[in-house]
Image (spheres, rainbow, N blue to C red):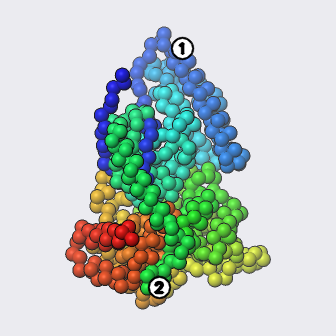
Amino acid sequence: MAEKKREISFKGIATSPGVAHGPAFLYLNKDLEIPTYRISDSTISLEKERFAQALVQTRQQLTAIRADIAAKLGEKEAEIFDAHLLVLEDEALISETLREMEQSKYNIEICFRKVFRRYIDFFSQLDDEYLRERALDVKDVGRRVLRNLIGDAGLNQNLLTESHVLVVDDLTPSETANLDKKKIIAIVTNAGGKTSHSAIMARSLGFPAVAGIGDISDFVENDDVLLVDGFEGLVIIHPSEATLLRYGKIELERKNIEKIFRSSIHLESKMLDGRPFCLQANIDDVSDIPAVLESGAEGVGLLRTENIFLKRESFPDEEEQFEIYREIAEKLKPYSVTIRTLDIGGDKNVTDSRFRFEETNPFLGERGIRLCLSHPDLFKKQLRAILRASAFGNIQIMYPMISSLNEVLAANRLLEECRQELLNEGKTFSSGMKIGVMIEVPSAVLIADTLAQYCDFFSIGSNDLIQYILAVDRLNSRVAHLYSPTHPAVVKAFNMIMDAAKRSDTPVSICGEVAADPIYTAYLYGAGVTSLSTSPRALPEKKYLMRSLSSADLEKLCSEIAEVPDQDKLIDTLQAFYDKTIDRIMSH
Ligand code: PEP
Ligand code: MG
């Protein structure tokens, strides 16, 4: 009889809701551990044979990836892999590796790494941009060959024949975006936090996820059964029958509650006393539109356009962007779609080497509007595409990472230049497109009164605002316990934004993850936020909640909060208010 394995529970950070249960698939992308050993004359031929096999295997993998990308995204996108295949055919790279091995008498992995690193250094120092980019190709292919030599397959979902729970050190946003829902049902990461862009993407793609779980990968083997609870941040290895039964019941209850919440999605967004509220969706691309329509959202409060760029090997040109923005605006008409201009940098790295920098502090570096203003050609292509799309629906634009008025003025100048160009070319656009500023940097809070004079609306990016106010890296699980939306400094900043907005009659939306958590919903509207924007999946509950409250309830909550002395008590007060409201709803 097979040995019954003991159930082990791990607690991490709940980053994306949902429960999933299935076999583990480990992908540990720590720095490759390259074995180092001496070889003798008699084993040289064996090493050569291993090298030849690894090259053939790499060629087969790259050819398969190329075909897959060509089918999914088109020939043009697949061309990058032609360059990768060419690297494999480089006679000099191969013969230099073999020579290095024969002379040094070290194993083939070490020799190959030494030679391909020399190539990377050589290419990256060239003046010619095209040749410089070859350094990235050599790096990619080199790592793949090394993985094959070591017997490490990388994140290859194609090998999976059934649904698995992915267990990984960390995932980049683009790796998350490329996960195949038929193969991966949940994500468990050793690193990461709730507001990392991978976590946000996991939520919008609907993968239950738990992050910051430390060293779980040391305890899990491939195909061990895992239960992932993305609500509580729990991962259970070898769950017992009793645990599965308990979760089955909880799941059923959750499904019933969800059904109740969904019953109001097409009803009016009005509170008991008739006061309106607005709920909008955060999206990444055209493919999210059905989820928006099903959620009852009144438009899009944040289109993270960088995700359109991150998914592709090369940047979409003006025409391609125009088609995407137009389709979204047309399909969501008459609701508004707030298009955020490109926000790359930080943890959002594109593959294009022109916009991929080695920075010591990327979140304090050339990110968001800073990068766009230093690359006006790139920025203007996007502004032109947005302006042209504005003729087909109700589009608003907003700038991320604003830290000074000068940035708003510079961005608006480029926008005006684009308007003039389009007028000269006889192309149409809406003359009334609203312009918003994201408030996500402390300096923007301090100058909110001034910024309000130069924009039509604010959108609070709480994910970044909290990280910058509290000096807590939003990706770092070691300091995740310090990341607190209820810290008095955050509350104070929030009040300052709301006061400046009230003085200038500026509408305020909030599109960071605070908008996703239902315990903050009543408080945020009570404080005067006009619209909450978050993942479409999180909207039905908020609508149901708000429809069961009145303005008097919000006022009472806000005056109670004003008396609360510290961040823990504030959380407790919000949680108690939420629990009471839910109990009331469920008892009817
Ligand atoms: C934010 O910072 O809250 C935000 C919405 O932007 P992002 O998460 O994309 O940085
Ligand atoms: Mg942000």
Q: Residue furthest right?
A: 426
Q: Is residue 55 above or below residue 185?
A: above
Which residue is at the front of the view, 537 or 45?
A: 537
Vertical side of 491 occupied by 484: above or below: above
Q: Residue furthest front?
A: 588
In-front residue for pair 358/211: 211
Q: Is mark 1 within 8 Å of ligand 1?
A: no
Question: Is 230 placed left or right of 286 in the picture?
Answer: left
Tell me which corner region of the image, top left, top right, bottom left or bottom right, holds residue 570: bottom left
Is label 2's Cβ within 8 Å of ligand 1? Answer: no
- Point 55% across, 63% down: residue: 283
Secondary structure beneath label 1: helix
Q: Quadrant of residue 166?
A: top left
Residue located 67% across and 82% down the image: 431
What residue is at 31 percent from the left and 65 percent from the top?
Answer: 484
CB-based contact (under 8 Å), mark 1 and mark 2 = no
Dot 2 amino acid type? Gly
Judging by the rendered image, the residue that carries numbered circle 2 is 274
Residue 84 is situated, as x and y percent measured from the top left of the image, at: 63, 38
Quadrant where the C terminus sits is bottom left
> Seen in the image, is 319 located left or right of residue 40?
right
Residue 246 % position (x, y): 35, 47
* Residue 235 image position (x, y, % from top left): 35, 45
Label annotation for residue 45? 1
Viewer-closest of 187 and 257: 257
Q: Residue at x 45, y 57 (%)?
A: 255
Image coords of residue 127 (percent x, y): 60, 49
Q: Please tell me which residue lies in front, 73 or 136.
A: 73
